[in-house]
Amino acid sequence: MDEQIETTVETPVNQEETTKTETTQEQATENQDDKTSDKSKETDETKTKDKENQESEKDDDKSKEIAAPDSYDYSAVKLPDGMQLDNEVLGEFEPIAKKMNLSQEQANEFVNLAVKLVGKQSNKVVEAVQQIQQDKMAQYKQLLNTDKEIGNGDKAQMDAYIDVADIGYKAFANETVKGLLAESGLNFHPEIVKMFHRIGSLCNDDKLPNANFPTGKEQSAAEILYGSTADE
């Protein structure tokens, strides 16, 4: 009976040793995970560096294949009508192009882009000048419509005044003068209209001297050049 009791008694378990064992196993597992993660990172970094080196080598190969010419020829560059390339600016661009090892085709692309930019700026300047001219013309017309001598806004009186001015305008303004007046808008300026009105009035009154039949006595060449002598 005593022997049976002794055989059934179990050996007590040491709880502390079990806990330590489990902890040690967990730490070992964590260390193994960390090592695996570090190796994975190193592998990724190595792949990235290899890829960068390969791309850099490709770029170097491409740059070796592209060689800058001894001198650039921009005859293939498309220019708007009336535009010419500035040789001074091209002289400043070429050392930069050679430093960048640009081919002829690449240099042409840069110059074409510069031409487009200049063209846009030129168009803006032209538009600004045209706007200024239109504003001036509108101002001249406003002065013309409010001028007291010309009609002070009365349409019938103004039309009659301008009809007389038109006679002087047609009689004395040649095509060059007409073009300049129209281009500048001065043909609407009140003082220009008044000037041609006075000329037109003289034409109507037959007060203009006839250039083919000059009045007065005939003058010698010396008198024309030096004037009349005191003895006369």
Image (spheres, rainbow, N blue to C red):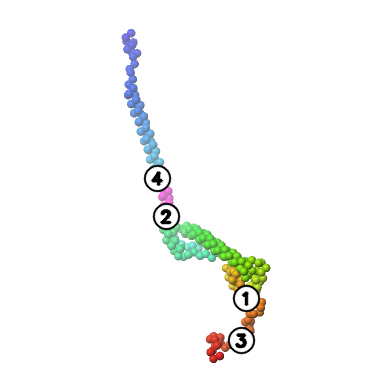
Is residue 193 rendered to the left or right of residue 64? right
Location of residue 188 with respect to 26 vertically, above or below = below
| Residue where numbered disc 4 is placed | 49
Query: Which quadrant of the view contains residue 197?
Result: bottom right
Residue found farthest to the bottom: 231
Residue found farthest to the top: 1
**Sequence-first tag of 1 and 2:** 2
Q: Are marks 1 and 3 in contact (CB under 8 Å)?
A: no
Residue 121 covered by magenta stretch: no
**Sequence-first tag of 4 and 3:** 4
**Sequence-first tag of 4 and 2:** 4
| Viewer-closest of 8 and 197 | 197
Label 1 crowding class (10 Å Cα cut-off): few <14, some 14-19, many 20+? many
Give the distance between the C-alpha atoms of the residues marked 4 and 2, in whole angstroms.
Answer: 22 Å
| Residue where numbered disc 3 is placed | 216
Give the distance between the C-alpha atoms of the residues marked 4 and 3, in whole angstroms.
Answer: 106 Å
For mark 3, give the secondary structure.
loop
